Amino acid sequence: MKFRPCIDIHNGKVKQIVGGSLRDAGDRARDNFVSEQDAAYYAKLYRADGLAGGHVILLNHANSPYYKEDLSQARAALAAFPGGLMIGGGINDENAGTFLRMGASHVIVTSFVFRDGKLDMEALEKMVAAVGKEHLVLDLSCRKRSTAHPGELSESEEIVTKKISGGNNLPENGKSISDCSEKYEKTKTEDDLYVKDKKTGQKDTVPEGKTGQEDAIPEEKCENGEYYIVTDRWQKFTEVAVTPKLLEELSAYCDEYLIHAVDVEGRQAGIEENLARMLGAWNGIPVTYAGGIHSMEDIRKIDEYGRGRLDFTVGSALDLFGGAIPYRSLHSFQS
């Protein structure tokens, strides 16, 4: 099990965000941390500490006015640690070679090979032809999907996300929306919202006269309990579930997998244990798990559930990014 460092870039800044809050419209996301340092600073740090195999992720879409700034940051990071970092975000068969020439060891791809909700084998073969299996990482980041809202975010999720991103406050009788790993539901009016964390049972916002139970989606409505791959910066569901069979089949085309548990990404509320167990039960090419880590206990769980096979990345919980886990404490995870 190895620690894989990260550099996430959004709106031209190194950031840590809540993964499920990312929206292309308005280049919005809920920030956990915005660094005063540039991407090259972190790349030089990782190089000095011998932490190869980390990833740089561009979180804006290619048509965003911020994309050039993201790209400039990424270019500087790759130059600071040539051969030591992978890169993802807007990668396709035509531009992948450029990123390798910039110094990336691998390119990370999701949306180019998962299109219209399905795996596009022709696109995957194009990527392998462009860079070679040895330089390709498939990002199979995934979310649970509710049968109430299959394939897309619910209307109330969009409302809540707008409130988070716009900084609007909820009614005085409720708290602002914070770490919640499941679906949001609205009550009678757009402003009368509550959120309940179904994992812990904690109510983040409860309007007057509500118990916090009325609109929560029951566990039995979570479709099959499976994790479906999401594309376009985690905004679109595919019809493809992450399974041991899929991992085996796709391993013929790539060197590694990167898998974010998007529902808990950036929330520091604990890992997706079932996902970690499933990934750990498969024994193949390297897999890096990301999402929800907030303590050394979570890292111990990844080691246990992953049977020592899963690598891991820590974002918002790391002291480099405003969290509590000491960066230096992770240096021992090198094998």
Image (cartoon, grey):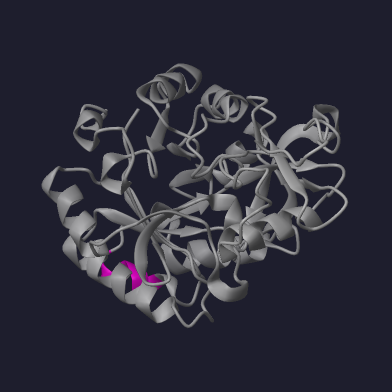
- Quarter of image, res 286: top left
Percent position (x, y) of residue 22? 57, 60
Q: How many marks?
A: 0
Residue lying at the far left of the rendered structure: 48
Which residue does the image show at 26% across and 46% down from the upper left?
320
Q: Nearer the viewer, residue 299 or 317?
A: 317
Q: Nearer the viewer, residue 126 or 320?
A: 320
Viewer can see residue 43 = yes
- Quarter of image, res 327: top left
Percent position (x, y) of residue 145? 76, 43
- Quarter of image, res 264: top right
Q: Nearer the viewer, residue 46 or 215?
A: 215
Which residue does the image show at 62% across and 39% down from the upper left?
180
- Judged by its main secondary structure, the magenta piece is helix
Q: Is residue 321 magenta?
A: no
Percent position (x, y) of residue 121? 66, 59
The N terminus appears in which quarter of the rendering? Answer: top left
Report whether 253 appears left or right of 131: right
Report whether 230 appears left or right of 58: right
Q: Is residue 174 above or below residue 170?
A: above
Q: Is residue 335 above or below residue 317?
A: above
Q: Nearer the viewer, residue 168 or 259?
A: 168
Percent position (x, y) of residue 91? 48, 68
Viewer can see residue 233 = no
Q: Which residues are magenta?
A: 97-103
The C terminus appears in which quarter of the rendering? Answer: top left
Which residue does the image show at 64% across and 60% down from the upper left?
163
